[in-house]
Amino acid sequence: MKERFGLLLFLILVVSSCQKKEEPITITSEDYHNSVDKVTEVMIHDIFSPPVASRIYVYPNIAAFEILAQNNTKYKSLAGQVRGLEQIPAPSQTESINFELAALVAHIDMSKRLIFSEERIESYRDSLYTSWADKNEAVFNASKNYGLQVADHIAAWMDLDNYKQTRTMPKFTVNSDDPSRWQPTPPSYMSGIEPHWNKIRPFVIDSAGQFKPTPPPPFSMEEDSDFYKEVKEVYDISQEITAKGDESEEVAIAQFWDCNPYVSVTRGHLMFATKKITPGAHWIGIAKIASLKTNSDFAKTVYAYTQTSIAIADAFISCWDEKYRSNLIRPETLINEHIDDSWEPVLQTPPFPEYTSGHSVVSGAAATALTDIFGDNFAFDDDTEIPYGLPVRSFDSFKEAADEAAISRMYGGIHYRAAVEIGVKQGRDLGSFVVANLDLTND
Amino acid sequence: MNRLLLVLICSTLVLGCKKGGDLFETPDSNSTGIDFTNRIEQSNDLSILDYLYFYNGGGVSVGDINNDGLPDIFFSGNQVKNKLYLNKGNLKFEDISEVAGVEGNSSWNTGTVMADVNGDGLLDIYVCAVVGINGFNGYNELYINNGDNTFSEQAARYGLDFDSYSSNAAFFDYDLDGDLDLYLLNHAVHTQNSFGRYDLRHERNFETGDKLLRNDGGKFVDVSETAGIYGGVNGYGLGLAISDFNLDGFPDIYVGNDFHEDDYYYLNNGDGTFTESLKQYFGHTSRFSMGSDVADINGDGRPDLISLDMLPEDEVALKSSEGDDNIQTQKLRIQQYGYHYQFTRNMLFLNQPDGNYMETALMSGISATDWSWSALFGDYDQDGKQDLFISNGIPKRPNDLDFINFVSSEQIKNKIDNTKLVDQEALDLMPSGNVANYIFQGSEGVTFSDMSGKWITKDTIISGATAMGDLDGDGDLDLVTNNLNSPATLYINKTGSKSNYVKLKIQFSENNRFGIGAKVYAYNKGEIQLKELFPSRGFQASSEPMIHFGFGRSEQIDSIKIIWPDRTYQLLKDVDVNQTLTISPKGTQPFNYNPAKSNGELLFTAVPNNLGFDFNHEEDNYTDFNREKLIPYQISDRGPAFALGDINNDGTIDILVGGSKFTPFKTYIQQDSVFINQRFNTVENDSIKETVSAVIADLNNDNKNDLFLTSGGGDFFGNSEALLDAYYQRNDSTFSKQKLPEFFQNSSVVKPMDFDGDGDLDLFIGGHTITSSFGAPASSYLLENDNGNFEIFQGFDQDVLKGMVTDALWDDFNGDGKIDLILVGEWMSPKFLSNKDGTFAEVNDLDLKGLWQRIAPFDIDGDGDTDYLLGNWGTNSKFKASKQHPMKLYFSDFDENGQTETITALEKNGTYYPLETLDGLTAQMVSLKKTFTSYTSFAGKTMDQLFSKEVMEKAQILEVNTLASGFLRNNKGNFEFVPFENNLQVAPLMAFAIEDFDGDGQKEVLLGGNYFGVKPYHGRLDSFPGALLKSEEEVILGNQLGLDFTKKSLRHLGVLTVNGQKCLLAVFNNDRAQVYKINN
C-alpha cells in the first residue's frame, strides 16, 4: 500500500515536471513602477545621499531602456548619446525573448549592484523570478539571460564613471578661519558629503562646469550688503512663518519638499534618524504619477523614467560642482552666530555647502525633462510623500511644482534667495540642454 | 545516605545565602532583610524616549542614623518609595521606612546624602528629585533626624526644597565658617539640537543649573552667582567630587557633565568664590561624564580623580555603539564653539605638583568599563593600595548604531513623531547593556588589575548608585549598590583582619560634627596614604562618614596626621592596626598649607621675554585623516625644524626654526644677549615647503656656515617640488640655493657626519613616509659631499635604508674606530649599520619593532660605555603591542581602486580586531557596506572574519611589538632593551637633550614629548610633563623642575649659552617656543 502510494506520487511529479507551461509572461508598466519603488525603499533603508541616489536611479533605467530600444521602433538607443555608452549586445535569438521582461530583469539586477542591502532586492527579485519561471520557463530563462547580459554591459560602462575613485578622495576640509566657508551644521555636524561629485562622468552635459551659475552675492556681514540682506531675509521669513504656526502654507510647503534622506532627531536620550526620499526620488515619484495618469505603456514609462533620471543625474553633477566651488556657509551657521543664537531652521540643514540649492537645480532639470515628455500645463496631484506622513499637493504643471520646490528651501531656512532663484534657472538651462541633445524617440 | 543529604542541604543553604567572589560575598535579601528594588515601569508617557535619564537609577546613602555604631542604609527610588534599613548587627536589617517617615513624596527621586545638616549629632537625609518635566512633581526633601528613628521633612525650612532637575548633592563647608554648605548638582535636558556656544553656561537657568548654597545659620542661601558657579542650560551634571585638589585647605569641586558640555573644575579661592579652571589644568576630560571619585592612588600625598564614561570593553558593544566625534566635528566644537577636548572613555587624572593632571586611564587599565555610573576607590583588600569598584549597566543602549540608523526610523518614527506614544516593540529592539560590575586591584604604580569575576562574581544586574561602609563591623569596606529592577546588592568584604586596617571616626565641631572636610595622612615605612572625608562620592550616593586605611602586614603604623577643616592638625604616633579610632581635636596646632617653597628656585625658570625668541609655530589646517582616512596617526605634524648654529659666523650661536606650509622657516641671530629675527630673501621665497629638520654647518669648507633643510609635511605628493630638500650656501651676507639630487618623499631628519673621513661633512637624510601611501617604505639617503656638491652614496644594500625612519645617530657603536649609523623609525626595529671601510652592513638582530621617535647616546647606567635612549609611543594609548601579540598594520589596495589603504589591527583575547569602526572603514572602502549592511553584522568580527584570506594575503604587514620608551643597555657590545618607568610612558617621547643641567659635573638627560596627531577615538596624548633622567633610577618630572611641557607637543630641546647664562630652548608643534634659564 505504502509502496503503491509512493509510486503514484513519483509519477505525478514526473508528469508535472515534464509538462512545461507555456503561458505568456505579461510585464506591465505597473511591474516597472514596483521595481523603481523597491529601489527607493532600499535606498531609504541604506541611507544614500542625494547625489549618490541620483546615480542609483539612472543606470538601471538606462539598462532597461536600452533593451526596449532594441525591439521597439518608437525609441532610439542612448548609445552615442550619453557619454561613453556603446551599443548593448544584440540578443543571440529574439523569438523567445520577452524584451519587457528582460528590461525589468536588467533594472532589478543593476539596482542590486548599486544599493548596499542586496538581500532586500534579492528576496523581491526571487519571488518574481519564481512566478515567471512558473509561467514560462523557456521565455523566462532567455529573457533573464539577455537582461543580465545587458546589465553586465551597462555595469562595465558604469564602472568607468569615476565613482569608485571618488570614494577615496579627501574629505572636505573644514576651516573655520574663513567666515564664508561652509561648516558642518547642527545637530549632527556631519562632514560635507560628496565633495568630489563633479568628477563623476556626466551623461549629456559636456562637463560638470557647463552650467556654472553666476556667483552668489559677495560674502559680507555688513548690514547694508546684498549678502547680509539675503541672510536676514531667511531669518525674517522663518520668524514670520513659524509665528503663523505649523499649519501655515509656507511651513507646509517646506515640509512637503524636505526630501532629506537622513534627519537626525533627538528625543530623550536618543539621537536617531528619520529618513525620507531624496529630491531626485521625489521627481522620480512625479515621473511615476505622470506615467500612470497618461496610462503610459511599459516602454513609455521606462522612457519617462530614463530621461528624467538622466536630467536629475546631470543636475546633481552640475550643482555639486558649484557647491564645492563656492563652498558657501549655510544660513543656520550665520544666523546663530550673528543674529539669533537659538534660531533653528524649519528643516534640518543638509550636510553640504549652500550654493546653489540642490533641490532647485534638480527640480528645474527634472521638470523640464518631464514637460518635454508629457507637455506643459500637465496638472497632477503629487502624493509622493504620503508614506512619510505628508499630504497630497496639487500642481498645474511640472514647472509650478519645480518653482515651489525651489522656494520651499527658503521657507525651510536652509537656503538664501540667490541659491534658489539662480539654482532653478541652472536646472532649467541644464534640463533644456539635456532634452535638446537627447533624441530618444522616433516621433 | 542521610548524612550526604544533610551535607547537600547545608551547602545549598550556605550557597543560598552567601554567594559571591573571593573577596566579596553577596548575601541575598532573604538573609539580610534588604529587599529594596528600584523598579522602574515605563509607560506611554515615560521611557528613555521621553526622559533622557530614565535609566540613571536611584540613590543610596550609608550612615549610622541612630548612633548605635552600626551603619544604616537609605535607598531612594525613582518611582518606588524610598527605604531606610536599620542595621541590627550580623548583617540583619530592619525596614523602618514607613515609621521613619522617609518614603518620600516626589515623583522621581535621584541622589541621596546623609549629613548632619542641623548640627545635632544625628545624620539627616537629603533626597534629590527631578521635578517639572514629564509630569514629575515634588521637591528635594530634607529629612531631619528626630533622634528616635523617625524623621521630619523640613526642606522648606532650610531653603532646600528645590523643584528642579536635581541628580546629586554634597554637603561640605566650602567657606570654612564651621557649618555645612551644599552643592546641588542639576542636570540639563536636551533643549536644543546644536552645541550652542560654550558661554551658555554663564546664563543661569533655575531648573538645570547647578547651585551653591551657603548655610547662613540654618538657612541655605543661593550664592552661585557671586561664588562663580555656572548654572546654564547645558550643564548635564552627573558627576560630583569634592576634594581639596590643590591642597590649600579650601575644598574644591569637580563636576562631571554628560554630553558636549565641559566638565567644571572649580578651585576654591578661599574668599567665598571659586574659579572654574578646567582648561588650565586638564588637557582633556571624559565626554559623557558620569560618576567620579577622588583618592590618592599613587601615594604622593595629592588627591587624584577618576571620571567615568561609557566606552565598552566588549568588541560587539564597542563596534555597534556610537563613539567619539569625527576629527572635524571635534575641531569645530573646540575651535568654533569653545569647548574643551573630551573623549569617550574613563579618565584617571593624577594630580601633579604644578596643578596639572597626568591622565593615565589607558595605561592604568581602567579606561573601558562600559556604561559606568559609580566609581569608588577604597583599599578593599587592605594591602595599602587603592582599589576601584565601578558599577555599571543600562537596560537599553540608546547609542546602538543599528537602532539609530536603521531600526528607529522604520519602527517608531511615525509613532513618536505624531503621537508621542512609545512602541514597546521598538524599545525591545535596542540591545541591552546589562554588563557586570567591575572591580580592580590597585598596585604599587598606577596600574590596576581587573579582578571582576574573581573578587566579585559577574552578574547581569544593572547597578548604579553605590555607597561604602563597614556594614558588618569587621573593619573592612563593604559596598551596597542600588540596582534597576533587581534587589539592592550588598557586597560584604571578607578581608576583615586577614590584612590589617585602621578605621577612623571623626568628631569635629558643633556644626560639623562628623568632620566633613578632614584630611588624614597615614605615614608608614616611607609610604604615604591620604584620605579626605567627603562622604558624597561616586554617583548619586554618600558613603559612611569614616576614614579607612589598609596596611597589609604592618602591625603598627608610624604615624597618622589629621588635618581638621579649621586648618589645624594633630599627629598620632605608633598606631596599632585593626582598630577603629574615634578622633576629636586634641592638642591641635595650626597647619601650614603653604610651606615655603623648598630651598630656593627650581632648576628651570621660564624667561618672560624669551630673549627675543618670539617664535610661535602654527601648524597648517591640513588634516591627514581627510585624505588617508584609515592611517593610525598623522604624519603632517612632525615639524617645525630646529637647529642651533652660528648662522652669521660671528662666533655666537643662533637659531633656525620653522616652518610650515607657506610659512618660511625663521632665523634668530644672537646679538647682545637677545635674539633678533633676521630675514633672508632666498629663504623667504622658498616657503611652500614644510621644513621638518635642519642643520647649520659649513658644507663647502669655506669657513662659513651653510644651511640644509629637509622637507616633509605629508601634504604634498607625487613629484611635487615642495618635497625636495633644500641646501643654501652662505655667500657674504646672503644665502644661495644649491642643486641637490632629487628624491620625493616626506623626510624626517638630517644628520651630518664626515663618515668617509675625507674632511667634509656628508649628510644622512631620513625618509619617513610617502604621501598618500602610509605604510609604503620610504627611502633614506646618504649624501656624499664632493667639494660642497652632494651625490647619493651607493654603499648601502637597497633594502637597508627602507622604512619609516624618524631619527638617526652617527656613533661608533662597535668601538672599531669607524663611525657607524643607527636608524630608528616607526613600524621597525632600530637598525645598527656598521661602517666597514666605506660600506655599511646591518649587524643587529634586535626584535624591537616600535613607533620610535628619537635616539640619543647616554651612559645611563654609568658603566662607562654608551647606552642608547629610545623615545617610543609610550603605553598610555589605545595602541597595544607585545612580542606575543604585535600590533599589525595591513597595507594594500584592498578595494583595487588605485589607492592604498591601511588597516590597523589590535589583539584582544587572543584574536585580532580592526582598530577602526565600520563607519571608519567604509569611509575609505565603500565596498564593505555591501558585505556589512548593519553594525551588528560587523561588530565583534575578527580580522579573519572580516576579510577573506586572499585579501589579507595580498597585504603587506607591518608590525609593532614594543610601545614602551626605554634604553638599549650596552652589555659589552650587546644591546638589551630596558623600558623606562611608567611616568615616562604616558605619551610619545619626541625630544632628548643631554647636558649637565644641575651642575653636578655629571650629564643628565632631559626628555619631553606628547603628540596630538591622532583621531578622537585615540584621544590626546598630552599628559607628559617632561622629565630629567639622572640615572636609571632617578627620574624627576618636569613639573617639579619649573618646566611647562604638559598639554604641549614638544619637538625639540636645545641648550645654548647667552651672555654667559646657560639656557634651555623648548620648541613645540603648533605652540609658542619657550626659553628657560638654567639655574645652577
Image (cartoon, coloured by chain):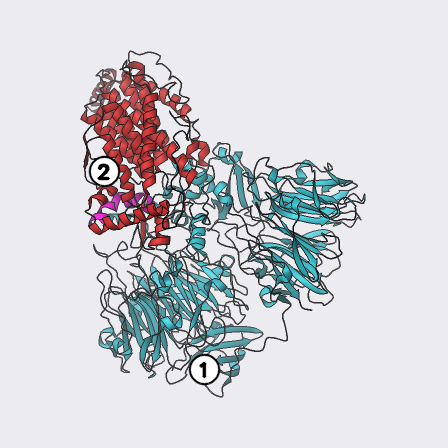
Magenta-colored span? B402-419
Residue B923 x, y percent position in the rendering: 43, 40
Farthest residue toward the front? A224
Q: Which chain did the image draw in red?
A: A
Give SS at disc 2: loop
Residue B830 x, y percent position in the rendering: 65, 47
Q: Nearer the viewer, residue B717 or B475?
A: B717
State which quarter of the image contains the N terminus of chain A: top left
| Residue B411 lies in the magenta stretch | yes
Residue on which disc 1 sits: B566
Kind of residue indicated by mark 1: Asp
Residue on which disc 2 sits: A385
Residue B71 visible within the image: no
Q: Quadrant of residue B542?
A: bottom left
Between the residue at mark 1 and the residue at mark 2, the CA separation in whole angstroms equals 71 Å
Q: How many marks?
A: 2
Residue occupying image coordinates x 27% and y 41%: A408
Please state the chain letter of the residue tagged with numbered disc 2 in the rendered image.
Answer: A
Q: Which chain did the image draw in cyan?
A: B
Residue A91 visible within the image: yes
The overriding secondary structure of the stretch rendered in magenta is: helix
Residue B588 x, y percent position in the rendering: 49, 86
Q: Quadrant of residue A276?
A: top left
Q: Mark 1 vs mark 2: give the one in front.
A: 2
Q: Nearer the viewer, residue B943 or B745?
A: B745
Task: Report crowding for label 1: few under 14, some 14 to 19, many 20 or more residues within 10 A (C-alpha).
Answer: some
